[in-house]
Image (tube, rainbow, N blue to C red):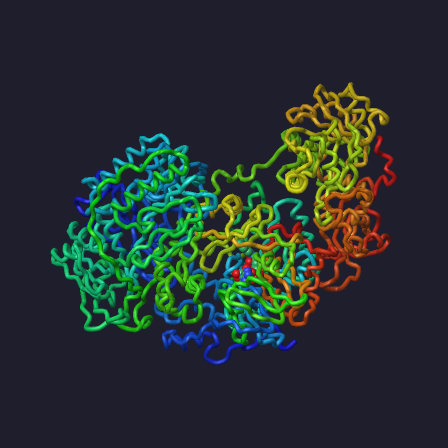
Amino acid sequence: MKGSANGMRALRGGASRYSIFALARNALSYHENWQKAWRSPEPKPEYDVIIVGGGGHGLATAYYLASVHGIRNIAVVEKGWVGGGNTGRNTTIIRSNYLWDESAGIYEHALKLWEGMSQELNFNVMFSQRGVLTLAHSEHELKEMRRRVEAIRLNGIDSEVMSPAQIKQLVPIIDTNPGIRYPVMGGFIQRRGGTARHDAVAWGYARAADDLGVDIIQNCEVTGILRDGGKVTGIETNRGTIKAKKVGVVTAGHSGVVASMAGLNLPIDSRPLQALVSEPIKPCIDTVVMSNAVHMYISQSDKGELVFGAGVDSYNSYSQRGSIPTVEGLLAAAVELYPIVSRLRVLRTWGGIVDTCPDASPIISKTPVDGLYFNCGWGTGGFKATPGSGHVFADLIARDEPNAIAAPFSLKRFETGYLIDEHGAAGVAH
Amino acid sequence: MSGQSFRIRDKGRIDRSKPVRFTFDGKSYEGFEGDTLASALIANGVHLIGRSFKYHRPRGILAAGSEEPNALIQLGGGNKSEPNLRATQIEIFDGLEAASQNRWPCLKFDVGAVNSVFHRLFPAGFYYKTFMWPASLWLKYEHVIRHAAGLGKAPPDRDPDRYEKVHAHADVLIVGGGPAGLAAALAAGKTGARVILADETADWGGSLLSESDCEIDGKEPARWVEESVAELEAMPEVTLVKRCTITGYYDHNYLTGLERVSDHLGAAPEHTPRQRLWKIRAKRVVLATGALERPLVFTDNDRPGVMLSSAVRTYVNRYGVLPGRKTVIFTNNDDAYRTALALEDAHGRVAAIVDVRTSVTGPLADAVRAKGITVYENHGIVSVQGTQKVTSVEVMQLDANGTGVTGTAKSVNCDLIAMSGGWNPTVHLFSQSKGKLTWDTEMAAFIPGTASQALASTGACNGTMGLADSLKEGLKLGAEAAREAGHKGRAPAAPKATEPEQGGLRPLWITPGKAKLGRKGKHFVDFQNDVTAADVQLAAREGYRSVEHLKRYTTTGMGTDQGKTSNVNALAILSDVLASDIPAVGTTTFRPPYTPATIGAYTGRNVGKLFEPVRKTRIDEWARANGAKFEHVGQWMRAWYFPKQGETFRQAIDREVKAVRDGCGILDASTLGKIDIQGPDAAEFLNRIYTNAWLKLGVGRCRYGLMLKEDGMVMDDGVTTCIGENHYHMTTTTGGAANVLSWLEEWHQTEWPDLKVFFSSVTEQWSVVAINGPKSRAVLQKLCEDVDFSAEAFPFMAMKEGTVAGIPARLYRISFTGELSFEINVPARYGLALWEALMEAGKEFDITPYGTETMHVLRAEKGFIIVGQETDGTVNPLDLGMDWIVSKKKPDFVGKRSLERESMASPDRKQLVGLLTEDPQTVLPEGGHVVEKLKPEPPMEMLGHVTSSYYSPNCGRSIAMALIKGGHARHGQTLHVPLEDKVVKVTVTEPRFFDLEGERIDG
Ligand SMILES: Cc1cc2nc3c(=O)[nH]c(=O)nc-3n(C[C@H](O)[C@H](O)[C@H](O)COP(=O)(O)OP(=O)(O)OC[C@H]3O[C@@H](n4cnc5c(N)ncnc54)[C@H](O)[C@@H]3O)c2cc1C
């Protein structure tokens, strides 16, 4: 490996590097001299590696292929605009306090990369380590919590148990009255967890990858995967054929569709996941709070919007919207736990299509087609994995072999049965 | 200030006989019933209403409806307080308290306005480029940014008001009660169709209420509205809903609406909710949502006193207030000329009309000129003076292509600028319905194209701008919609309508200023979020070329007005930079709700006790009266234990546990899931769902079964009994009941529809009392004479029907404790009677009521698993040492194939074992993890975790179960459970601790 993923590599030198000084300098010329964050090149006839899908995971993969593995002839092809899929729709919760060792491995790897991301990319992704608090509402949940907290601790990851009184102090708007339907009986917090600006993650990776020569090709939809004798040779797109030695597919909710272009059938279920924001209000909640029992979680964006999320809608769909009953259930739960939100107003609701494996863990894997790789199945919780996922996927593509972190997430596990079931353990898995 | 000095004497629909007092920022004012807060403030000459989001610039009132971006208000105080309301939509009532937002210490002098001074450092997206060093400081920067942002404040505590939901069906739902919508409703209503007509405002008539220069059938438009509404009200199948914003358009013509039932009254009258959420399923929808006027993008176009031209007309004609005494009109079309005439008519002076069109002719221009008003053709406003209220403007001639100005600037004094940049049809709902928009070059706007649901658009929202055409089209589409919904009838003849004739517009998306864009003054595109034309250009220059990138990078259109006044302007400016057609650049997606909708309304009555009501058994009352402690189990509240006076938790549990084994205990087991299964293929179905054999279970016999998911992992367990031929009674775990029922249905409906079998949940139909312990037979015998209880006649795993305490019952001889035990099922309503009879009969045997905790200890002593405790979706039957229950002979069952996978037999799997602590008094915490190689510090490798752990009074020591890697081969090994404060040494054993030979089952 060349360079370190975590290192403070100064990507852009000179005039195009972002800083307060650059802002001041550009202010003098009325901001008329800023350069493009990334180019919009025409596709070349052939690349060493093509990444399909310009979400955070795809762009991160391209960036690490270039920065860590020194591969420069790379394209990212995106059917719409970069970050327009789930990357730009998610509620940006970042944490690594997962139960199973395999999950803790990848998410903690990601969290460490988050901690240096703005500096590495020279783009402020507003990674805000404001803490992620998970509530327990029954004796049973307290026991489950204990199990998770102990596992997290023994994996060397930070976590703190909190009493209802400590929770009330941290989150004054929460109703800790023991008489409510789902009383707050305790919780645990990962202080290093938090949120980030989702668009900035896509843009930051796009800009940094572009800087290393990666072609980012938007409005380019993949319609076929070209193969020759069990080996990938390129892709068919609405802008023509592009050849490639290797193809990495990172298309989240549409992974099943793209896989079928290569004759593959992925164990993926695609369903709408909804989120919504309130109108902006002055700060009233400083951390992220999740509750599995009532299937809702809440945080407040820097603009002041309360960001709410729920569980997935219960039907399969590729239409990027969900149903009203899910929203009603989510908001009823919100009012139950945070009574002050009742008079606030919903500003925007939306949905994204999430790709879920039967064991609720991702796929980072080679496929039966040589040179074709898939990274998907992140379901409702892959934003937090973005840098880690891109980093290990790049490694897999470059070396044609998974490293220790990626290995458990191979497609093979559905044949062998070595599943990493995060369902029971994770509940609302954001 | 003298009251209401800007009131026009003889105009407006307010009720002058009903004065209303209200306060704004603590100062008291008077308005009239029928005023909005905006019109009442204008009547009092108040124009500075708020501060903008980023630069904290002083802002006034831009619009007269829900598109208002600037005039945001914090309404009321205490728990009824509400942030971010638009002054243009608040109907005033006596005692209303309004306050401005986002300013400190006060509106006139706001410290945050320093942002305005450093504005050159803050172009669009500046925060992505800085605040990165040192990394550790971002949380501090963020703290400051968060406090500067955020608009209004949340109320301090619980909402005192009530909300409701309405579920409605309609043949035709008509959205919007302007001329087109009323016409559609009349035509549809006449066919007898069930019609719902909804409008966002407090009055019917829409734009008609703002006009004084048109006629319908020779009548004033307001008269026509009144008559039409009266006609509609007389139609029994027509429902009219005012103050109801249709907020969302979902699949299958399903729409939501928010009705503000009593907000305008200040307080909700008794038995009246504050707001209602409408959920409407309509066969056909007619959208008649009108159009929104576009601002012009010129230098400092955000100053208080800059208003949309149509809003000015609304204030004059509908509310009878004068937004300014001396007005400059700035326009690119004829419609603003109507505003000039309306102002003149109301004794306001029009200082000049500035028109970007090169030559202006036609009847409206003639009429204006006839009044002696100067029209500056091919001119633009290049500067605006007055920061807290407009005082004058400078006007210059445009150059040949409209990108610069020439000549000298003329200064015109004024206190109001009425601007019009043309109209955007309100296509939000159409777009939400997934209809495709098309670009109309003549209007320079998006109009509805191909629809994808059963809907029609009419009037201005369809790009039909003329009154006569709107009425005609509304009637036609209303009748058509009713016919499509199955009714008969034709459209009535259209009334004759007259209004001033208008010419075309000149879309000039940016009005050039004296300096290059972005160098002097600000050309605002999105007022609320402070996005300027220069920001849009910067974003495009930096490569944020998709509309969505533009929105997200600059935040244009992301405010509480959702870009109603800014989206098309932003898009046009972007496409200019990209030198591309507007439609090629695209439109943004409109996301519901159309206007922000109260969270409480989505919640409705599902708050407090009605938020997921708790389920209770028939015996709950008795348990409460007898001092039980409770725990939540799934949706149920279950008795956890029954402490006696002064007993600790441990003492109570020890007593209960011992009582069961020594004599007799009684448990309310009513919460267990119960499913009645019938049909000739019932046995076959069970045989496929459970892992063991079910084809030969005799009538009156019970069997324990394990259900797996497709992946071979344990999903649920329970005893199922053959009640009669083709009739079974299945029990499930308490928490799993609903899941299991849908699981059975799913397999039946999707995989094996050929099987004749039916399922009904009977959980609520039976009360179940379990009586356990060597004395249980003796107790039961006292109450039941028609059953032979001898072990031979009534063996373990049998069911008999009988009469217990006079109640018809099913008795199951099954056991979750290893003791002699009966589960008595009676029709639910007899549950308490049965319980009390058993308590009475058991007195002499010291019968002891116990709860879930004792149940857990007892079953753990015997090594019985609890699904969800010993299992978590990753545990197969072999891991549990339950190979005996997995049939080797059956051709198939759910999960069988997965069990054959390589990993399932791996010796490294986590397997269920018992753990005995070195010190018998130490009770391990459940959830603790077991390690083999202890290290002084984490990380260390975990083998698995403690699933169950109790003190067992019957064993005289602590007992625990755990799932650990390769556990079955580790019996006898010593391992460690490292806890935060100590390490507990444990020995691995069989997961069974008491009555290892199973000798107690017959009592
Ligand atoms: C409402 C919601 C809330 C969420 N909240 C959280 C959260 O709080 N925390 C968290 O960690 N995760 C969350 N997630 C999940 C998270 O968003 C995703 O797991 C993650 O963003 C996936 O990233 P990605 O780059 O793989 O996918 P995407 O960003 O979806 O990128 C895939 C890209 O592939 C493109 N594509 C698809 N088909 C083709 C084709 N044929 N040709 C070319 N391009 C194609 C798409 O246009 C898209 O841009 C949430 C998701 C949703 C929907």
Is residue B2 visible in this depiction of the protein?
Answer: no
Residue B504 left/right relative to A257: left
Residue at x 41%, y 71% (from the top left corner): B541
**Which residue occupies the extreme front position in the image?**
A229
Image location (x, y in percent) of residue B392: 21, 64
Image location (x, y in percent) of residue A397: 64, 69
Residue at x 53%, y 44% (from the top left corner): A329
The front one of B349 and B931 is B349
Is residue A307 visible in this depiction of the protein?
Answer: yes
Could you tell me which quadrant the C terminus of chain A lies in? bottom right
The front one of B928 and B718 is B718
The front one of B53 and B301 is B301
State whether residue B437 is above or below residue A13: above
**Which residue occupies the extreme bottom position in the image?**
A14
Could you tell me which quadrant the N terminus of chain A lies in? bottom right
Image location (x, y in percent) of residue B960: 78, 47
State whether residue B71 is above or below residue B145: above
Instruction: Give the quarter the ligand 1 occupies.
Output: bottom right
Image location (x, y in percent) of residue B275: 41, 40
Residue A95 left/right relative to A303: right
State whether residue B215 is above or below residue A299: above
Q: Quadrant of residue B168?
A: top left
